[in-house]
Structures are given as C-alpha cells and as structure tokens.
Image (cartoon, rainbow, N blue to C red):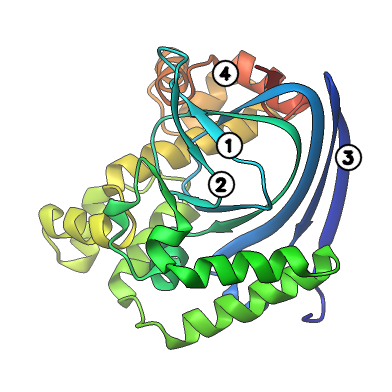
Amino acid sequence: MHAGRIIRVARGRLPSGAWESVRATAHPELAIYVRGYQGYFEASSKPVRRRELPSGDVALIISFGPRYELIDPVSGGSLETCCTFIAGLDDAYSLVDSSGAGVAMQIDFTPIGAHRVLQTPMHLLARRTTELSDLLGSVADRLVEQLFEASDWRSRFTILDEYLLAKIRSAPTVSREIQWAWQQLTINNGMTPVSKISGKLSWTRKRLVRAFRDHIGVPPKTLSRVLRFQHALAKLGSPNANASLIAVECGYSDQAHMIREFGALSGSTPVELVRCYSTDGGIVEA
C-alpha cells in the first residue's frame, strides 16, 4: 500500500436497510488516470433504485455476486442486467436497481485513464454499459476473483493499484494534444470554448471531434455540457446558493436555461437534485 493513501468510511440507513462505503485514493502515479476507488456494502429488504448522473468519468463496477438491473427511465422497463461492467461517458442519466445484500467496488477513471487501461476506442463504450469480460476476457474473471478473496478493503485497493500500474506502464501513451485538450475542459468545468481549443492546437473542429471520439468517447461539446452540469450541481449544494448567479457562473444564459439542461441531463430540476443528493445520494426504494 502506498504511503499517504486517504481512506474515508461512511455509513447510512436505507428506507429498509443500511449501507457502508469505503473510499480511497489511487497510487500517485495513477493520479491523472484514476479519480479514486470505492468499496461498498448494502443490505435492504426491499429493492433499491439509484439515479446515476452524467459525470465526465468512466466507471468500472465490480460486483461480488449480485447483478444490477438497468431500468429504462421512460418506460420503467428492464433494459439489461449487469454484474462487472464499464459504464462509458454519457450525457443522460440512468436508473439502476439492486436488491438484497451486496458487496461491490467502483473505480472511477478519467476518460484518458480508461482508454489507456482498456485499449479500446472509447466511442464503443460511450452511452452504454459493457461487461468487463467482453473487453478483457478471462483476465477480468481472475481480477474479480483476486479482489473477492482479499482479506480487507486496503488489500483490495492495493491489488487495484498493482494491476492498473502494470497496465498503464505497458500501454501506449496518449498524445499530448489530446491530453491537453481534455484538461482544458476539465480544469475550466466545461467553459473553455471548443473553438479556442482547436485554434490553440491548429486543428480543425472535425479533427478535434474525431480525436475525442476515439480517446474520450464523446465530442468535446458533449463533455463540456456534462462538466458544466456537474459544476452547477456542486455549487447549488453549498449554503445560501444563488441559483441565478450560479447559472451565469457556470456558462448558462440564465436560470431557465440551467433548469432545462438539468431536466435533459438528469430528469430532475436543480432543487429536486440538490435535495435528493444531499440526503441519500440519489437512492430511493424501487
């Protein structure tokens, strides 16, 4: 385990059960590739539904047993069930059901990190879930087994460090231009004009979009939209937040524009989301 790892433990109640979450930072060498690790346990006598919001990151969910059911937000019907899967970049929310007791892990990758680890054109993973075994074959099964058999969360986080460091060190590097362009959007919460980025690189807009498609998964304009949404949601959760000022600060033309974007990206209003995620992390009984 590397020195200085930050580990945070949180616990809470569900309407019909309880949950526990353990979060940790990745190895420093993985800093621009991995946002962090999470291990969690939940037990509920009733099905639990989560609203997963667009984030600008790529998530790997590793379940030690129970499967998750993806629900169509429009019809409410089941779309598919997943166990250990990659959730690519998206500009729409999803609903995920779980039931009973379950233990799982989540690794939040930056798009650059996911591309280096998976060595897959990222547009093939965007706006969908993909079973990890479809990408890594039997390697995925061995990794899940090794994590499952580990004695505690610290050991599991160390296993992930070792596995991801080996993958990153052996993977082809991403061009400096792509990394710089992605960083310009993330550093400025999606408010850097795409035309400014392509101009600085002396690239056509078409070339930039094509590069983002392969290395990030979605066009830069789409990523900007998601990053602005996340930035606005974070600011709205602060005490005495002024929605009108936040809308302008986050690149929206006015508060009405921000409300429309929240509806399109999350299916909820800003007020509803802040209330939901400040209390139970978007968890409701299904």
The residue where tag 4 is placed is: 270
Q: Nearer the viewer, residue 159 or 139?
A: 139
Give the label on residue 281, or none: none
Q: Nearer the viewer, mark 3 or mark 1?
A: 1
Looking at the picture, how far across and down is residue 112, in whole percent? 41, 65
The residue where tag 3 is placed is: 11
**CA separation, marks 2 and 1?**
6 Å
On screen, residue 198 versus residue 70, left or right, reads left
Question: N-terminal of the two: label 1 or label 4?
Answer: 1
Q: Nearer the viewer, residue 50 or 24?
A: 50
Question: N-terminal of the two: label 2 or label 4?
Answer: 2
> In percent of the image, x 73 and y 75: which residue is there?
158
The residue where tag 1 is placed is: 68
On screen, residue 192 versus residue 76, left or right, reads left
**CA separation, marks 2 and 3?**
23 Å
Question: N-terminal of the two: label 2 or label 3?
Answer: 3
Question: N-terminal of the two: label 4 or label 3?
Answer: 3
Give the label on residue 83, or none: 2
Q: Secondary structure at mark 3?
A: strand
Label 1 near label 3: C-beta < 8 Å? no
Q: Nearer the viewer, mark 2 or mark 3?
A: 2
Looking at the picture, how far across and down is residue 108, in whole percent? 57, 56
Kindly identify the amino acid type of the residue bearing the numbered disc 1. Answer: Tyr
Q: Quadrant of the C terminus?
A: top right
User: Eyeballing the image, is 125 above or below 158?
Assistant: above
Kindly identify the amino acid type of the residue bearing the numbered disc 3. Answer: Arg
Dot 4, crowdedness within 10 Å: few (<14), some or many (≥20)?
A: many
Dot 3, crowdedness within 10 Å: few (<14), some or many (≥20)?
A: few
Question: N-terminal of the two: label 2 or label 1?
Answer: 1
